């Protein structure tokens, strides 16, 4: 689960990490009041959406007057923000953070994540904050400081101090860095976080170290034990289809292509998408209907795929291991009867009772192309959806 910048900063403050003073607003009127309450004469208006790269997308606006703040608010409220990290539709802006403009001296990067390979919590730090950290990592990997912490061990003040030194932070800034990193580590371990990031972590002309941005991703599987975190969920930022699908235990992700896919098993779904691409098509979605598929879930999957905006054809690819292909075929026919079918469809069935399943489909009144070979099925659906 993702949360907003202002929510991440709220957690930061609870764990003694300094942030600039800022006020969350729901209207332009509230924003004007916020400027008065914050004081000063430079404010930054920041769109609260579940995506980074907001600066690049025009969602972080520096303002040197209250009139400029008003103008920025009127522009952002109710619009969709498109950033390098969103899809073409962008995310709705319902709330803005009005933040005091800071005298930035340096922009650093500090993040923690789970490194599966080393089985450690990995601290990443860099003097090159403020920009795309993936780009820094790929172009100048020597600019990334890495430090692994055994999750059964502990992070010590000395560890934090040595990282502070590598970032060229001295005296009071180094001390503030230790508090910041200790706080991040505490949030990471007590709240079941999968990624926590401050980009940029700034030093100011006043010798303060501040978290200017905040990103936290939580492990969905552990949310049941963090009611306080669950309350931070903002459904307006999530994909409607993906939420609907998860209610039916379907693993669904919308994509930009034209061929809807219904597959059992995540690995087979990935392979199916690769084959479609290989033969000149592009998938409209990722969908893993899971192992014990029921007719109801197959019907829901059909509905989701058919309402995907660009979809021009459907490829069903089922490998019957535990599940019987004749039952799947029945499910498909029931689903079509229930939700209709207005697109070309190719069904590939293989495994337990595949022959019986294909026979059922071939004998039905519905126009279904059946295949037992996956490559042929992929070629066929690419051709039909052109
Ligand atoms: P994003 O990472 O989504 O683009 P950030 O919060 O990191 O959003 O803001 C982008 C950039 O805008 C920062 O790197 C910083 O240079 C500038 N910025 C953000 N907030 C402030 C602020 N309060 N004062 C001055 N500059 C800011
Ligand atoms: Mg940022």
Image (cartoon, rainbow, N blue to C red):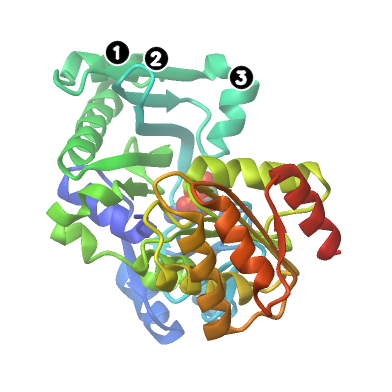
Left or right of 95, for residue 307 = right
- Graded by Cα atoms within 10 Å as few (under 14), some (14 to 19) or many (20 or more), the crowding at tag 3 reads few
Q: First in sequence: mark 3 or mark 1?
A: 3
CB under 8 Å between discs 1 and 2: yes
Element type at mark 2: helix
Would you name the residue on which mark 3 appears? Answer: 140
Would you name the residue on which mark 2 appears? Answer: 166
Q: Quadrant of the C terminus?
A: bottom right
Q: First in sequence: mark 3 or mark 2?
A: 3
The image quadrant of residue 336 is bottom right
Would you name the residue on which mark 1 appears? Answer: 162
- Point out residue 298 in the picture as x, y percentages from the top left corner: 48, 68
Element type at mark 1: helix
- Graded by Cα atoms within 10 Å as few (under 14), some (14 to 19) or many (20 or more), the crowding at tag 2 reads few
Residue at image location 35% in from the left, 40% down from the top: 195
Residue at image location 56% in from the left, 60% down from the top: 357
CB under 8 Å between discs 3 and 2: no
- Count of numbered labels shown in the rendering: 3
Q: Is residue 301 visible?
A: no
Which one is in front in this view, the residue at disc 3 or the one at disc 2? 3
Q: Quadrant of the N terminus?
A: bottom left
In 3D space, how far apart are the residues under numbered discs 3 and 1 (Cα atoms)?
21 Å
- Graded by Cα atoms within 10 Å as few (under 14), some (14 to 19) or many (20 or more), the crowding at tag 1 reads some
Asked whether 42 or 50 is in front, the reply is: 50
């Amino acid at each position: 689960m993702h949360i907003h910048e202002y929510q991440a900063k709220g957690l930061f403050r609870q764990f003694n990490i300094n942030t600039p003073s800022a006020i969350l607003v729901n209207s332009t009127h509230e924003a004007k009041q916020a400027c008065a309450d914050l004081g000063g004469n430079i404010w930054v208006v920041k769109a609260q959406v579940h995506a980074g790269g907001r600066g690049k997308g025009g969602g972080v606006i520096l303002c040197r007057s209250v009139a400029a703040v008003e103008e920025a608010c009127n522009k952002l409220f109710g619009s969709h923000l498109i950033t390098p990290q969103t899809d073409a539709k962008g995310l709705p802006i319902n709330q803005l953070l009005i933040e005091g403009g800071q005298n930035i001296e340096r922009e650093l990067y500090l993040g923690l994540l789970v490194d599966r390979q080393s089985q450690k919590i990995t601290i990443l730090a860099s003097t090159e904050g403020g920009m795309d950290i993936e780009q820094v990592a790929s172009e100048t990997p020597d600019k990334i400081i890495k430090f692994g912490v055994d999750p059964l061990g502990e992070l010590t003040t000395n560890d934090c101090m040595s990282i502070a030194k590598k970032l060229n932070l001295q005296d009071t800034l180094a001390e503030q860095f230790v508090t910041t990193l200790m706080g991040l580590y505490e949030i990471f371990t007590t709240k079941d976080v999968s990624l926590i990031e401050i980009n940029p972590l700034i030093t100011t002309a006043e010798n303060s170290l501040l978290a200017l941005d905040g990103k936290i991703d939580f492990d969905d599987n552990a949310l049941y034990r963090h009611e306080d975190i669950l309350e931070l969920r903002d459904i307006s930022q999530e994909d409607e289809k993906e939420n609907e699908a998860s209610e039916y235990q379907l693993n669904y992700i919308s994509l930009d292509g034209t061929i809807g896919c219904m597959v059992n098993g995540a690995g087979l779904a990935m392979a199916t998408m690769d084959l479609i691409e290989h033969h000149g098509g592009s998938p409209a979605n990722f969908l893993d209907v899971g192992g014990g598929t029921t007719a109801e879930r197959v019907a829901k999957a059909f509905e989701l795929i058919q309402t995907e905006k660009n979809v021009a054809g459907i490829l069903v690819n089922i490998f019957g291991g535990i599940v019987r292909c004749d039952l799947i075929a029945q499910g498909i026919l029931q689903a079509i009867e229930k939700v209709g079918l207005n697109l070309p469809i190719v069904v590939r069935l293989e495994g337990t009772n595949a022959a019986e399943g294909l026979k059922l489909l071939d004998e039905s009144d519905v126009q279904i192309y059946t295949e037992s070979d996956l490559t042929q099925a992929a070629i066929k659906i690419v051709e039909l959806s052109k």
